[in-house]
Amino acid sequence: MSLLKLGELYKAVILEHAQQPHHHGQLPDVPGLTLNNPTCGDVIKVQLDIQDDQIQQIAFSGTGCTISQASASVMTDVLAKQSPAQAKALIHDFSQLVMGDEIDVTAKKQLGDAAVLGAVAEFPTRIRCAMLAWHAADQLLDELGGTPNEQES
Amino acid sequence: MATTNYRADFPILNTMINGEPLTYLDSAATSQKPQAVIDALVTYYQHDNANVHRGVYTLAAQATDQYEAVRDQVAAFINAPQRETVFFTRSTTESLNWVAQTYGEQFIGPQDEIVLTVMEHHSNLVPWQQLAIRKHAKLRYIGLTSDGQLDMDAAKRLITAKTKLVAVAETSNVLGVTNPINDLAALAHQNGAIIVVDGAQAVAHQPVDVQAMDADFYAFSGHKMLAPTGIGVLYGKLDLLKQLTPAEFGGEMIDNVTQQTTTFAAIPQRFEAGTPNISGVIGLGAAITYLQQVGWPTIEAQENQLTERLLTGLLKMDGVTVYGPHDLALHGPVVAFNLNGVHPHDVATGLDMAGVEVRAGHHCAQPLMQYLQTSATVRASVMFYNTPAEIDRLLTALAEVKEFFQP
């Protein structure tokens, strides 16, 4: 087999993020949302601490495959310090990218390491893995939208 | 025994996947279809298509004859005592749900116990769990021995006078182990309970004799035994079937209908409401004919040889965990495993790049995954149409995947 093909999906940067994920762990007293991937049983929890219209702290926890873990890790880098509105836009851009749609150069640049996951578009069965953390963040932003300064008690 | 190559009978096996020859090792999810089954569907639609049990014209009689002939074929295939004890459903899932919604609804009450095993597929677990919730009945689970077999000592403790129903897979879709149905049936019957057997993973791999195993209900799907998707079978003992109210009402299942009342048709038509999956039944008949032409001695010998190559190959590899029995004598043609430290989805994507198609996930058996303390596994399953070379391709690709993720 050609491991070169495998290397197209699992680029070095992806493997690094999966092995040493950024913002991994749980934040005390910060609202979170947990989603699972029903096809494999993987679970990812994303937490967002939003103050003054900005994501001050972000973290993810749970276990999963290389793609879901790396994707969660790059996501935390991309969304940290963004406003909820910017975060929603970035999540939308990322979703377009992994679905194989073209996104503009500026958006791609903003996605940083996350843009590397665009290769997932060539592996349709893995899109769900790549999107898991982003879906969780997206839903959590919606939930927190009404009361951005309040924390879960 | 020299293996015979049946690949030529299965056109899809010539397909290329990601530039590599297709190595299909997911027959436990669905089997591939031989040309004989594909041809039977085409012939049916080109020459015999009409609705069954309705028309008085010649074509309708032709379709009905073919449909009913398959009922005889299925009855003989599983050694059912009467043809009426066999009726057609959509799938194993529908068959098992049907038993829960008819027998379960009528005969399970508060505090009654339903005994399952931890290795059940969701289709033989969730219907009973939901029934237990509706009826305030209790679920009991038989666990495993340390070598991955059903713990029969636990079965003896758990199946008691409180037990009303035992539901068990004949062969596990994850562990590959075949359960001692005769012993479980005897335990159930001694305690006045019935036994419902999920035969989905067994019917294509070994002779099934519902009378010898003394199953009260036996469910299976066509698509795992070379037939099309969307056709399933339920066998039930006649004295039980006679007590059951139909789960669905409509055309073809009636005797006489007035504005206020209906009398039902005889069994099995009583349980086949509406136009059935006629072409699926025709395909199932062709699949049984094909399996019988290949013959059980050949099927069992080839699958045993392939399973041995797969199991020993995996057990020899460092950093591989194999779930279920490690003893070939206890093993059906399904092997679940993990590459330590590599997620099964990553392993499956890696193997896919080599054209090797395996399943990764929880295999619709989440309670078993919890019991095994893993979230998911890789699963390779073989059928007689696989070859030793394909097993070698899996093992080689797996070594490369291991190298890639654990350099």
Image (spheres, coloured by chain):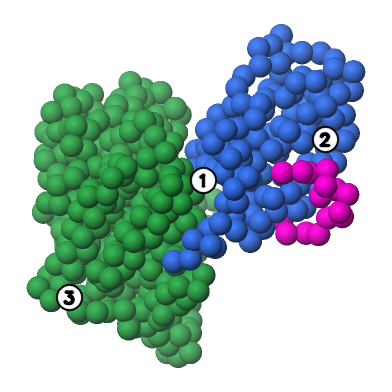
Q: Chain ID for label 1?
A: A
Residue A87 - label: 2
* Residue B187 lies within the magenta run: no
Q: Residue at x 17, y 62 (%)?
A: B304
At mark 1, the secondary structure is: loop
Q: Find the magenta span and give its range.
A: A98-113
Residue B3 - label: 3
Nearest the viewer among B83 and A134 is: A134
User: Vertical placement of A125 versus A59: above or below?
Assistant: below
Shown colour of chain B: green
Q: Residue at x 59, y 55 (%)?
A: A9
Mark 2 Cα shell of 10 Å, populated few (<14), some (14-19), many (≥20): many
Discs 2/1, front: 2
Of labels 2 and 1, earlier in sequence is 1
At mark 2, the secondary structure is: helix
Amino acid type, mark 2: Ala
- Residue A115, image x, y percentages: 74, 49
Q: Chain ID for label 2?
A: A
- Residue B277, image x, y percentages: 45, 69
- Residue B97, image x, y percentages: 41, 46
